[in-house]
Amino acid sequence: MVPSTLDNKGAQILAKSLFKELRGSGYSTNQILSLSTELIDLVTQDLKGEHAQAAAAAQASAANEAASAQRAAI
């Protein structure tokens, strides 16, 4: 399965598979919960980084547009 095409059903299947594999390898439910929390933290950090990059790009674009408008007015 290609990650970019992972839909809700695919995510559920992957999660169940991973859970069964971890439990089968001897991990406790608390350890799996801790892993899940860490994954959520990493995704949250990644999203914050993407948001910051998008905001910086929007700011740069606005500054470029303002500079172009100033040059056109001259």
Image (cartoon, helix red, strand yellow):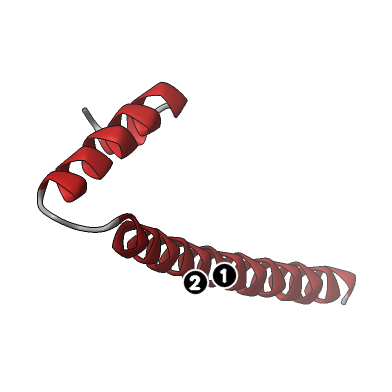
Q: Nearer the viewer, residue 39 or 50?
A: 39
Dot 2 corresponds to which residue? 45
Residue 43 at x, y percent in the picture: 45, 62
Dot 1 corresponds to which residue? 48
Mark 1 touches mark 2? (CB < 8 Å): yes
What crowding class fits label 1: few (fewer than 14 Cα within 10 Å), some (14-19), or many (20 or more)?
A: few
Q: Is residue 55 left or right of residue 25?
A: right
Tell me the kind of residue under disc 2: Gln
Q: Nearer the viewer, residue 35 or 42?
A: 35
Residue occupying image coordinates x 57% and y 70%: 48
When the figure is inspected, residue 10 is found, relative to residue 33, above or below; the finding is above
Tell me the kind of residue under disc 1: Lys
Q: Is residue 24 left or right of residue 33?
A: left
Residue 24 at x, y percent in the picture: 12, 44
Residue occupying image coordinates x 52% and y 65%: 44
Residue occupying image coordinates x 15% and y 43%: 21
Residue occupying image coordinates x 70% and y 73%: 59
Quadrant housing residue 37: bottom left
Q: Nearer the viewer, residue 48 or 69?
A: 48
Q: Can residue 6 be seen at all in this image of the molecule?
A: no
**SS type, badge 2:** helix
**SS type, badge 1:** helix
Quarter of the C terminus within the rendering: bottom right
What crowding class fits label 2: few (fewer than 14 Cα within 10 Å), some (14-19), or many (20 or more)?
A: few
When the figure is inspected, residue 1 is found, relative to residue 50, above or below; the finding is above
Q: Which disc number belongs to residue 10? A: none
Q: Residue at the top extreme?
A: 9
Quarter of the N terminus within the rendering: top left
Residue 9 at x, y percent in the picture: 41, 22
